[in-house]
Image (cartoon, rainbow, N blue to C red):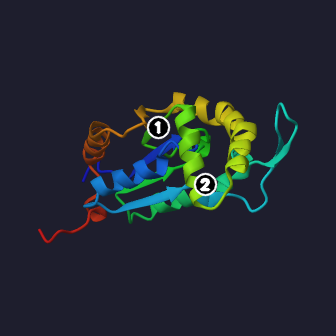
């Protein structure tokens, strides 16, 4: 069919604890009648990550929030190959630097940034990591000495690339409605839709 697209690629970015993974999961549920692939940037962490020196204390940390912490080249390649496979109607890509990295961003059809104030994000991060067995002091020190600086350096500026900025304090059904409707209007190839016995 003329004008028919093979696949729609949606990128979701935001700070640590903003709810990127949760929003991607909710969106996937909304599109359950379509073939959807999810790609998480966290899966592309390098085994050996760069070291950073905290600006004020001078303490040294393994850097989890720098572009060099991720194998961006492999992620961009895998995204391209996933789209070209023609197996999926929708590909959802989520991660801290999804909108920062040009090689990822240029493959996105819709760019979403989830905005949550820093105090709420650190509370979420504390709760999540303490449930994983980490200690309060270690979590808070790493956030205050490393994560927040990288957020302002790399993550926050990437919101200017977003087509939509969503309030991550509490996801509204309307935001999901809008993205779902937009996705369904993209005239995606029939072979990428799940058959329902019609």
| Residue extending furthest toward the right | 58
The N terminus is located in which quarter? bottom left
Residue located at (48% from left, 47% from top): 20
Q: Earlier in the sequence, mark 1 or mark 2?
A: 1
Seen in the picture, residue 22 relative to 102 is either above or below; the reply is below
Q: Position of residue 168 (x, y in %)?
A: 43, 37
Q: Position of residue 132 (x, y in %)?
A: 60, 61
Q: Nearer the viewer, residue 139 or 44?
A: 139
Foreground mark, 1 or 2?
2
Q: Is residue 151 visible?
A: yes
- Count of numbered labels shown in the rendering: 2
Label 1 sits on a secondary structure element that is: strand
Q: Nearer the viewer, residue 167 or 118?
A: 118
User: Is residue 162 shown above or below 17?
Assistant: above
Residue 41 appears in the figure: no
Distance between mark 1 and mark 2 Cα atoms: 20 Å
In this picture, residue 137 sits left or right of residue 188: right
Q: Residue furthest left?
A: 198
Residue furthest to the front in view is 136
The residue positioned 48% from the left and 36% from the top of the image is 113
Please give the residue where the numbered disc 2 appears in the rendered image. Answer: 129
* Residue at (33, 63) in percent of width and height: 35
The quadrant the C terminus occupies is: bottom left
Name the secondary structure under disc 2.
helix
* Category of crowding for the residue at label 2, using alpha-carbon neighbours closer than 10 angstroms: few (below 14), some (14–19), many (at least 20): some
Q: Which residue is mark 1?
A: 114
Q: Which of the 4 image quarters holds residue 102?
A: top right
Residue drawn 27% across the image and 41% down it = 173
* Looking at the image, residue 197 lies above or below residue 129: below
């Amino acid at each position: 069919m003329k004008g028919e697209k093979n696949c729609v690629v949606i990128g979701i970015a935001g700070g640590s604890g903003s709810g990127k993974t949760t929003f991607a999961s909710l969106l996937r549920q909304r599109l359950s009648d379509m073939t959807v692939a999810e790609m998480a940037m966290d899966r592309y962490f390098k085994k050996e990550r760069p070291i950073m020196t905290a600006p004020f204390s001078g303490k040294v940390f393994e850097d989890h929030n720098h572009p060099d912490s991720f194998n961006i080249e492999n992620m961009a390649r895998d995204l391209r190959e996933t789209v070209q496979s023609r197996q999926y109607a929708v590909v959802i890509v989520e991660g801290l630097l999804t909108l920062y990295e040009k090689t990822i961003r240029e493959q996105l059809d819709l760019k979403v940034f989830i905005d949550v104030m820093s105090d709420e994000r650190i509370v979420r991060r504390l709760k999540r990591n303490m449930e994983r067995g980490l200690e309060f002091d270690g979590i808070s020190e790493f956030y205050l000495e490393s994560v927040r600086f990288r957020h302002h350096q790399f993550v926050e500026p990437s919101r200017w690339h977003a087509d939509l900025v969503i309030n991550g304090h509490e996801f509204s059904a309307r935001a999901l409605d809008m993205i779902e409707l937009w996705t369904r209007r993209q005239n995606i190839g029939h072979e990428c839709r799940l058959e329902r016995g019609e």
